[in-house]
Amino acid sequence: MLRPPTLVWLRRNLRAKDNLILKAASGRGGPVILVYIWGNDPAVGSVSRWWLERSLQSLDRDLRALDSRLILRKGNALKALQALIKESKAGAVLWDESFEPEQRKEDAKIRAALLRKGTFCDSINDSLLFNPARIFNRQGKPFKVFTPFWNHCLSLTEPSAPFQSYGRLISPSVWPRSEKIKDLKLGPKGKWPRKLAMFWDPGSEGALAALRVFLKKKIKDYPIQHNNPAVKGTSGLSPHLHFGEISIREVWHATRKHAASDRRPGSARSSEAFLRQLVWREFSYYLLYHFPGTVSRPLRKEFSKFPWKTNRRVLRAWQKGGTGYPIVDAGMRQLWGSGWMHNRVRMIVASFLVKDLLQPWQTGAAWFMDTLADADLANNTFGWQWTAGCGADAAPYFRIFNPVLQGEKFDPEGSYVRRWVPELSGMPSRFIHKPWQAPLEVLTKAGVKLGQNYPRPIIDHDAARKRALFAYDRTGKA
Ligand SMILES: Cc1cc2nc3c(=O)[nH]c(=O)nc-3n(C[C@H](O)[C@H](O)[C@H](O)COP(=O)(O)OP(=O)(O)OC[C@H]3O[C@@H](n4cnc5c(N)ncnc54)[C@H](O)[C@@H]3O)c2cc1C
């Protein structure tokens, strides 16, 4: 006799390939029903919603090629699962384990409620290479520094290789009712989505294509180019990884395989540099798991006394890319225009907001969560706490990025600034990162009218630096 159906509750593993939950469900022997439940979570930002809509469409297409389909429901997850269990007579629910604090609490409640009614439940880690719950330092405490964490990860058994097929997925005799994607009312309307579509191809096919291009063309120069915002020197995989459209195991093993087959000098170094970034992602999740309060509170307690100067006007100028510091403005406009920002520039704009403008890192983190396609609670929290100097293995607070020197170092010709701040495109490279120092005739020739078509600096960096160090001193830890 056929076993009762198993529900696969998909959340952030929106792929048909190398999906451990799908594999476990198909291994149970009965029909498999895949469901995505949209709970209208306010924490999911505008660009993420846009991405999610397309990712779900792409997943449904991939599942139909396997003679399956994606069932969509909306509302409270527990109620939706209970309704589906009743309709389909499912005997089990499997899902991908979350490492985010609120989701874990929610999952525990759902598990308890389903078990009480006799439904088998299990959650499996399908998003990380290494399970954070099993990793501790020699003192039995969580790691707080990256390099020992990385070394520890390398000493563990290598993550399992991706698998190729599930065999046949058995369909239920009757498919449960599904919402239509458009009824979930996910994406923002208007010009914004059209702009985003010029940069991204959400879904597993887009993810795989990004990985292939990266391995074929970019990884060899990754150690040098990953810090250059003017070129596309990184993988662009972050939103795909966030939504689990490609498995992290596949990215890991494809990189290892590429390194083994590429005999050119420097190849091993390039691959290691990239694998290290994947483990930074692991580290972010690891810290969030062990220090769940860091979503809203600094890991280093003394920073809870930091004298921020909350100011909506300067926050708005930063958000709109109107600070008068070209590298900061270029980054903020890249974010608004494409749903992504280069990692080096993320550090520069975050430092500027937190240290030059003394705005709380949480406000910057919230803006990123709303506007990034790869908005990810773990990576974003970690990135902001790192830059603000209040997190684990963080940049020391007193190391304050100078936006002019950072621009000159990482965008020496100003190509990145010219692309995203077209008002400055006529400026000579010498002044592109500090237009206010350019002689009037240079500005005139470049068509720049400071204070009119491009702002004067919102704050003097040297004075801001002193103010930030003074504020830091008041936390008692300088
Ligand atoms: C203030 C700030 C906020 C950030 N917010 C996010 C966020 O919301 N979501 C997000 O995915 N990343 C975030 N990052 C990390 C990093 O900027 C992005 O992961 C990276 O720019 C993504 O581009 P990529 O996929 O081309 O990266 P690649 O250089 O190709 O790296 C490959 C993958 O490694 C991981 N990775 C790379 N750098 C980091 C890092 N510093 N920390 C953690 N994981 C990393 C990502 O999953 C990335 O896709 C943030 C960094 C800072 C400084």
Image (cartoon, helix red, strand yellow):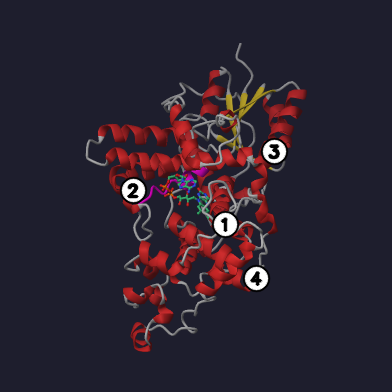
Q: Is residue 402 left or right of residue 355?
A: left
Type of amino acid at the residue the image marks with label 3: Ala
Q: Position of residue 212 (x, y in %)?
A: 34, 41
Q: CA distance from mark 2 to mark 1?
A: 25 Å
| Residue that carries the numbered disc 3 in the rendered image | 77
Chain part drawn in magenta = 233-242
| Residue that carries the numbered disc 2 in the rendered image | 223
| Residue that carries the numbered disc 1 in the rendered image | 388
Place residue 143 in its image quadrant. Answer: top right
Residue sitting at 58 percent across and 66 percent down? 468
Label 4 crowd bin: few (<14), some (14–19), many (20+), radius 10 Å: few
Asked if marks 2 and 1 touch (Cβ < 8 Å), the reply is no
Query: For the residues carrying marks 3 and 2, which lies nearer the camera in this image?
Result: 2
| Residue that carries the numbered disc 4 in the rendered image | 312
Residue furthest out toward the top: 1
Label 1 crowd bin: few (<14), some (14–19), many (20+), radius 10 Å: many
Q: CA distance from mark 2 to mark 4?
A: 38 Å
